[in-house]
Amino acid sequence: MKRSPLLSWLSRETSQMHRQLESTPLLSKLLDDSISLEEVSEVLDRFLWAYRPIDRALEASLSRFLPTYRTPLRTSLLIADLAALGQPVRKQGTMTFTPPCTLPETLGILYVTEGSTLGGTMIADKLEQSLARIPRQALSFFSLGGSGSPSLWEKFLVIFPSDPDSHDFSQELLRGATRTFRHFLDAFSSRDSTARPEDPQTTCLSDHHLADSLSP
Ligand code: HEM
């Protein structure tokens, strides 16, 4: 499916954050054949930590801004995968993620969550063949990108606007995407399991006129 100029712009603007995330110590091991079961469990645990508040934020904003759009709750997949590996959930729900206030901000968050499934299939294949030999039934989170037809990414492309309504629309879109990438960077950068990274305080725009103009 052809990319809209708006999507190509968003991708360019956030590509450095994607590279930064891929090269965090734990995530960079995902494509390494020598990854251990312990390290895979730590990755799933950190994703679970990060996704708990994102799932909640998206549930609220999707029903408000995109009521017909469906995306699986990552939290349940991650809990099931950890259970299939016989691993406990270590990090508890202490990260925060402020729910988005506008449609473009919601689209920016979805760009990151749905886009992340693009690399997932490759990661699942790698993990199955790695030293850790992760069984398919413990790879539902990483296999998400290849599990439906149309895929999550294709469904996202259908709702993604081809042109921004306005400069404010693009900026809100970018803000949603960058704060989501930052949230994952926080989750994968803190070494200490007692650390409590927090989403920088973002509040709904007080300017009602702008908020209204960004709503569908
Ligand atoms: C080791 C970890 C990761 C690898 C190897 C990886 C790899 C990839 C690959 C191969 C693509 C497809 C690029 C294309 O088809 O043009 C992709 C796209 C993407 N990934 Fe990742 N990824 C990783 C982690 C993540 C994480 C943790 C997130 C966010 C939570 C993320 C967000 C995205 C997004 C938003 C896209 C779409 C980018 C675009 O083309 O506009 N990725 N990734």
Image: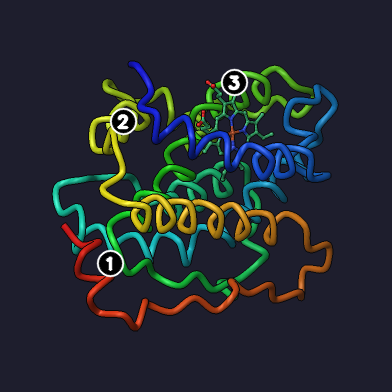
Label 2, label 3: how many angstroms apart (C-alpha)? 20 Å
Could you tell whether 127 is left or right of 93 in the image?
A: right
- In percent of width and height, residue 11 lies at 52, 35
Q: Residues within 10 Å of mark 1 (few under 14, many from 20)?
A: some
Q: Examine the image and state in which quarter residue 133 appears.
A: top right
Q: Which structural element holds mark 2? A: helix
At label 1, which amino acid type do we have? Ala
Say if 130 sits above or below 86 in the image: above
Judging by the rendered image, the residue that carries numbered circle 2 is 157
Identified at 32% across, 69% down, the residue is 101
Say if 88 sits above or below 6 in the image: below
Tell whether circle 1 marks a residue whose Cβ is less than 8 angstroms from ligand 1: no
71 or 84, which lies in front? Answer: 71
- In percent of width and height, residue 23 lies at 78, 39
Q: Residues within 10 Å of mark 2 (few under 14, many from 20)?
A: some
Label located before the other in sequence (1 or 3)? 1
Could you tell whether 149 is left or right of 114 in the image?
A: left
Could you tell whether 96 is left or right of 108 in the image?
A: right
Identified at 80% across, 22% down, the residue is 33
Tell whether circle 3 marks a residue whose Cβ is less than 8 angstroms from ligand 1: yes
- In percent of width and height, residue 85 lies at 62, 42
Q: Nearer the viewer, mark 2 or mark 3?
A: 2
Q: Which structural element holds mark 3? A: helix
- In percent of width and height, residue 80 lies at 48, 47
Say if 76 sits above or below 207 in the image: above
Judging by the rendered image, the residue that carries numbered circle 1 is 60
Judging by the rendered image, the residue that carries numbered circle 3 is 122
